[in-house]
Image (cartoon, rainbow, N blue to C red):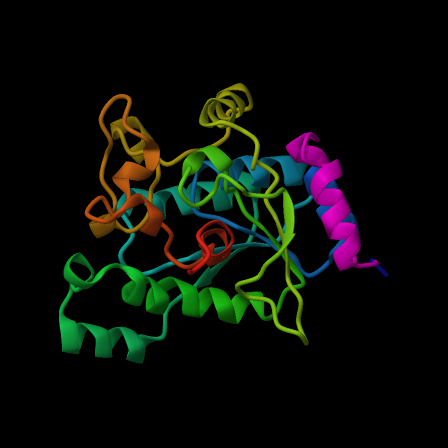
Amino acid sequence: MMVHLTEQQIQTHALDYATQSPKAILQLALQHYEKISIAFSGAEDVVLIDMAYNLLKKPIEIFCLDTGRLHAETYRFLETVRTHYQCTLTILYPDATAVEQLIKEKGFFSFLQEGHQECCGIRKVAPLTRKLNTLDAWITGQRKDQSLDTRAQLSVIEIDKTFSTVEHPLVKFNPLANWTSAQVWNYIQLYEVPYNLLHERGFVSIGCEPCTRAVLPHQHEREGRWWWEAGTKKECGLHASNTISTHKPT
């Protein structure tokens, strides 16, 4: 039986593993948690899938969010990963009634006027919450350099303050927290890891089709996400704890 980490151990490991390799952090996660899954959507996540596959010599549980508004290339990418690693992807869908009500009341593009939080809450946060309620830990591909506004203080291991409850504490591992984009792509090229073909067209950070666009040379990658909003708002709610910890209300 796997022994879960205590809160004190998590705090200690957050410091001790801050300079460790992503593989070492993944190994720590897989040693202590059986009900654990990788959240998959982008290039960083496939790097983690590849690393975990090599550590376990078998597929790890993987889930991804289908908001109903992804690019066609993203769906092809999901299928490529599924077949490449011979893994099962758990696809999470939003509640159909909630989506229908949002569209009926506010149309298809209410987020352009009102901000993306409501739409993301229905299409992403709600289905993610249902999934995380079945897990003890999850693994993400977040990096500190993805956003100086919301991810600069990211830890390699933490208690997920957004989705934990007293009855159900949830641990979150971010093995690539200290990696750069260049390191991610060096790994992808070196080990021939699959990637979304949108990257070849200038897309760096890829989300839903209406809320994602290619970036210009030397633009920061997150400028292609929700480009009409301020940098401090460029989180969809999946990692709301980043905003909680770095921008406390006054």
- 10 part of magenta stretch: yes
The magenta span reads 3-24
Is residue 46 in view? yes
Query: In the drawing, does residue 192 fall left or right of residue 146?
Result: right
Q: Position of residue 118 (x, y in %)?
A: 29, 67
Q: Position of residue 58 (x, y in %)?
A: 68, 44
Query: In the drawing, does residue 109 fall left or right of residue 186?
Result: left
Q: Of 165 and 43, which appears nearest the observer?
A: 165
Where 150 sits versus 4, above or below? above
- 225 part of magenta stretch: no
Quadrant assignment for the N terminus: bottom right
**At 42% from the left edge and 37% from the top edge, which residue is drawn?**
148
**At 60% from the left edge and 43% from the top edge, which residue is drawn?**
155
Query: In the drawing, does residue 170 fall left or right of residue 217?
Result: right
Where 110 sits versus 166, above or below? above
Q: Which image quadrant for residue 195?
A: top left
Q: Which image quadrant for residue 43?
A: top left
Q: Of 121 and 131, which appears nearest the observer?
A: 121
**At 43% from the left edge and 41% from the top edge, which residue is drawn?**
42
Toward the right, the furthest residue is 1
Is residue 56 in view? no
Query: In the drawing, does residue 52 fall left or right of residue 119?
Result: right
Q: Which image quadrant for residue 49?
A: top right
